[in-house]
């Protein structure tokens, strides 16, 4: 079983930066990849960034060049560094872990609000 807890959300001005983190805990689990999603009010949850165990990363077009996904294995923490934030980046950000068997684990989300 995997527990994921996000942190680091908050209020930031447009053009600013923010880093959100996802701490993983539990035992006896393996993960194939980890991802960041976001959900804006009235919109579907969307995939933002993916980090495969190979180290390969992938990003949604809307955030390419501005967001960076990374992981600290020693701390079991996934991070999303967000730069040049835009108003449309306002959303609740969720991390997700996927097991080799296809099980999905989600965090509770952290709010990111970008103001003008």
Image (cartoon, helix red, strand yellow):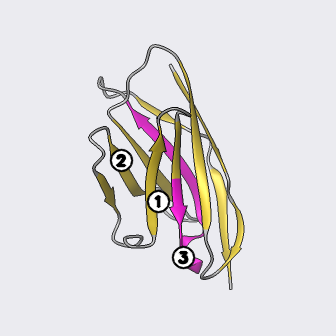
* Mark closer to the chain start, 1 or 2: 1
Residue 54 x, y percent position in the rendering: 26, 40
Q: What stretch is highlighted in magenta?
A: 80-98
> Residue at the location (51% across, 56% down)?
80
- Look at mark 2 in the image and give the residue it sits on: 51
In this rendering, position of residue 5 left or right of residue 57: right
Q: Compute the Cα span from label 3 to label 2.
A: 23 Å
- Look at mark 1 in the image and give the residue it sits on: 44
Residue 52 x, y percent position in the rendering: 31, 43
Query: Which mark's residue is nearer the viewer, 3 or 1?
Result: 3
> Residue at the location (46% across, 66% down)?
67
Query: Which mark's residue is nearer the viewer, 3 or 2?
Result: 2
Would you call the spot at circle 2 few (<14 residues within 10 Å), some (14-19), or many (20 or more)? many
For the C terminus, give its image quadrant. bottom right
Q: Compute the Cα span from label 1 to label 2.
A: 21 Å
Would you call the spot at circle 3 few (<14 residues within 10 Å), some (14-19), or many (20 or more)? few
Query: For the residue labelled by badge 3, is the local secondary structure a helix, a strand or a loop?
Result: helix
* Mark closer to the chain start, 3 or 2: 2
């Amino acid at each position: 079983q995997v527990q994921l807890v996000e942190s680091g959300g908050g209020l930031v001005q447009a053009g600013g930066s923010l880093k959100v983190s996802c701490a993983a805990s539990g035992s006896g689990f393996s993960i194939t990849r980890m991802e960041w999603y976001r959900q804006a009010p009235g919109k579907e949850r969307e995939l933002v960034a993916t980090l495969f165990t190979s180290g390969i990363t992938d990003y949604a077009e809307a955030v390419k060049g501005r967001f960076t996904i990374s992981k600290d294995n020693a701390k079991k923490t996934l991070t999303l560094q967000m730069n040049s934030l835009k108003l449309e980046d306002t959303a609740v950000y969720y991390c997700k872990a996927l097991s080799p068997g296809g099980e999905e684990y989600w965090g509770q989300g952290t709010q990111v609000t970008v103001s003008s």
